[in-house]
Amino acid sequence: MDFAAALAKLEKTANATTNSSQDRKEESDDKRRRHPETYSEPHEGRPHQRMRYDHHSQRHGPSNSLDELVRFGYHIRPSSHREALYESTSDPKHICLMLLCIDSVPYFDIWKAFANPTDHDTNTIVSLVIHAKYPQTLFQDEIMKKFLLVHPPRLGRGNSYDDPEPFSLSPNWGSVQLTQAMICLLKRGMQIGLDKEQRDERFATRRFVLSSHGATLENVSPVDHFVFISESCLPVRTLRECVHMIWGSDETVVDKPPNGGVVNGSAVADGANTREGITGFDEFAGNDNAAFPPSNVTGTENKPVTPHIDAFAKSWLHARNLSTPGVPRNKYERDQFQNIHRMVPQFCRWKADQWVLLSRPHASSVLQVDAHMRPEDQLIHSFSKVPASDEMYFPTVLAVLGILKEGDISSGISTRQVTYVDWTEGMRNPACFERGIRDFRRVAMLARQQGCLFARKFVLRHPGRDEVTGQISGSEWTASVIEFTRIQC
């Protein structure tokens, strides 16, 4: 073959390739026009592999709509399509405390006294679920080990389960693993009262019940409300007061300072409350698709309480967005809002205190957003670059679902603050209270004035010192909160 013939053959092959490429492009454009809602560009990887987002990409800025989240497969339902709220009036009510700690729960006796009041209020059950960064010490304690998260049961010899092993994500301060630990606690709390077929007490969720009268019930009712706490949190109200406020009206309940604002010789002043975070993600808990448990609204001291229209679904989130007056305009705050993945719209980006209280309908909606998806595609990864994502995840997801809206309380969101924190010493770390019952009485009064249920940060010893000065007994706590209740009345 001479040179001219070889050149003519090469030109013919090039023209054929060009025509073939043009035909494929026209076919692709035709498909896009006929099916714009389902068509996606071809991408590298296995044939017919589903398109995946790079959760670390921020190249194109935030989206202005929910379309990308919907196309990616997240279950986003408008608030009008959420499950109907339960309206039954049966007892008992059920609150789940979801505790995040490092390696100990120094005030466990106080939480036990809180869950078992001396007035024998048997209409409320309190459960406790713990995630510890280093769980081994707690797991060696026969009393504490039953409240810890454990890995799912594994069948061993003799058709019986192997011994439980503690579960922990070992999160660092402000890391996305801390938010994942909170989600794990919420998933496990949603299962309390629903695993009636589990006969092994080491794995049954009824082991989490902290109330003595609730532990004796054959069938524990599912949880109505979930609240996040830390090992340095303490309740500043009795259980009866908390039930009154959670299931009561939307009016803010605060205490008036007695004796001209002086408690035990200390002047009562307003404290600063803003933000703070503490220290096999999908392995051990599934999603809860069960019906919402019955609940009712009753008052204290035999006085009826008139509930808000959405009192049964009320969640407490001290939430704000970038347009909220008074939100700090610093780099840390900017990074929290801007470092969320771009497919989460800017108008859905909200921030709240880490210590939120969620109703069962709202908790269920949050978990159902990505329960059907692969772990690597779940929405939590859109927050992997966010500082202290534990403050951003839950309010943002509730906003994506259409539950949390600007100036709208019809979806059952209260902007009350759950936990009092003193930030007067700086924004990096809150003030620590290490003087035992003396600090508790002063701080509890401040928290009650602001309508809070709990307060932190109580510690056994001052940071950097070995002397233990912050011990508080269950009896001291009980006497103090009962006194506060009488003063209020």
Image (spheres, rainbow, N blue to C red):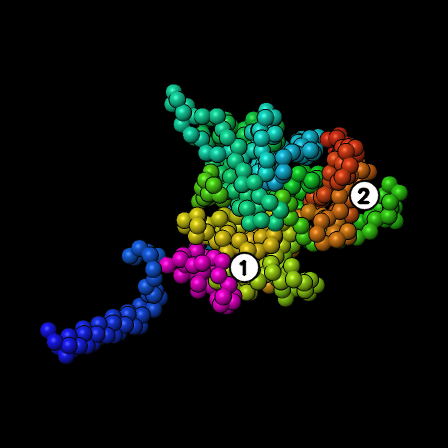
Q: Amino acid at mark 2?
A: Arg
Q: Alpha-carbon neighbours of circle 1 within 10 Å: few (<14), some, or many (≥20)?
A: many
The residue tagged 1 is 340
Q: Is residue 387 visible?
A: yes
Tell whether position 280 is magenta. no
The answer to which of 132 and 13 lies nearer the viewer is 13
Which quarter of the rendered picture does the N terminus lie within?
A: bottom left
Name the residue at 49% across, 38% down. Answer: 191
Q: Quadrant of residue 489?
A: top right
In this view, 75 is above or below 297: below
User: Could you tell me residue 254's position as x and y percent?
Assistant: 75, 49
The answer to which of 237 and 279 lies nearer the viewer is 279
In this view, 280 is above or below 67: above
Q: Amino acid at mark 1?
A: Ile
In this view, 115 is above or below 450: above
Left/right placement of residue 436 relative to residue 419 reads right
Find the magenta span and give its range. 51-78
Q: Quadrant of residue 12?
A: bottom left
Q: As drawn, which residue projects farthest toward the front? A: 2
Report helix, strand or loop for mark 2.
Answer: helix
Q: As drawn, which residue projects farthest toward the top? A: 158
Name the residue at 82% across, 51% down. Answer: 269
Report helix, strand or loop for mark 1.
Answer: loop
The residue tagged 2 is 442
